[in-house]
Amino acid sequence: MEIKSYQNQAELFVKEYLLSDSVIPYTSVICGICACMMVYDLTQLFCNVYFKSYPSLSKIKQIEWCNRSISTFHAIFIATMSLYFVFWSELYSDHQYADLVTFQSSALSTFTLGVSVGYFLADLGMIIWFYPFLGGMEYVLHHLLSLAAVAYSMLTGEGQLYTFMVLISETTTPGVNLRWYLDTAGMKTSKAYLINGVVMFVAWLVARILLFGYLFYHIYLHYDQVKQVNTYGRLLIFIVPVVLSVMNLTWFGKIIKGMRKTLAKRQ
């Protein structure tokens, strides 16, 4: 009976405090930061035990190794949730609710965005602290834009659909990180490296090129609703995807060049 009583109290605490509408943004951001710290520490512990080459890496390489595990964890989480909200959930359906699609949100969608804000804060902090070893100015710009858009959407509930559409692009992150891991482990000439490159090319084309085209088409179809978002929100809805699209096309060009070099070496 005591166990059941403690369980009921815990459930009440989570429902009434941690997941109440007023504190969800703050709770979720803290959860995101704590999750990043936990993944970093667990990766460090796991790699020291099971990867013989890890201890021989330089200190900055070890930090980047663990940092990339954080971004992989976040990518899997946010891409899964984004795909659910955009394609399977009825939350942003034009016919499900009376509210405009640009103003629809829920406790779960807000919590999910908060976890992502926590990640971007933690990762941006690491990038700046170890600058430029974990990424140059383009990574700082990418994270600042993402942080501004995701945080605004989380706090106001506006434009969450388009935020999740953009966050689907995180599906490419595990492939990018795996490519770095294989390169660092001296497996650049392996078959796994080649397969990863092909998969990354397809994923990038779908998630960061074609999907962004669909996003702009959706904005065009719902422009009368987008106009009702305040000025700052409209700027984020338009500016962030445009800037990220330019960056995605630039990086896509580098992926194509890398694939050509890899294929040329194997002939």
Image: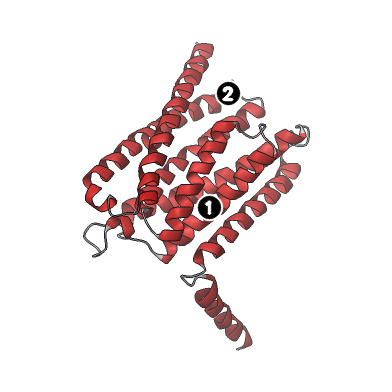
What's the mark number on residue 117? 1
The residue depicted at 39 percent of the width and 59 percent of the height is 157
In the rendering, at what x and y percent does residue 78 appear?
A: 47, 50
- Estimate how packed mark 1 is, as few (under 14), some (14 to 19) or many (20 or more) residues with alpha carbons within 10 Å: many
Q: Which residue occupies the foreground of this view, 192 or 39?
A: 39
Give the residue type that dot 2 points to: Ser
In this rendered view, identify the residue nearer to me: 253 or 83.
253
Numbered circles on residues, count: 2
Amino acid type, mark 1: Val
Does the CB distance between marks 2 and 1 fall below 8 Å? no
Q: Is residue 97 left or right of residue 207?
A: left
Residue that carries the numbered disc 2 in the rendered image: 190
> Can you see residue 13?
yes
Give the vertical position of 30 relative to 211 (above or below).
below
Tell me: residue 198, above or below residue 47: above
Q: Earlier in the sequence, mark 2 or mark 1?
A: 1
Q: Residues within 10 Å of mark 2 (few under 14, many from 20)?
A: few
Instruction: Choose between 148 and 203: the one closer to the eye.
Output: 148
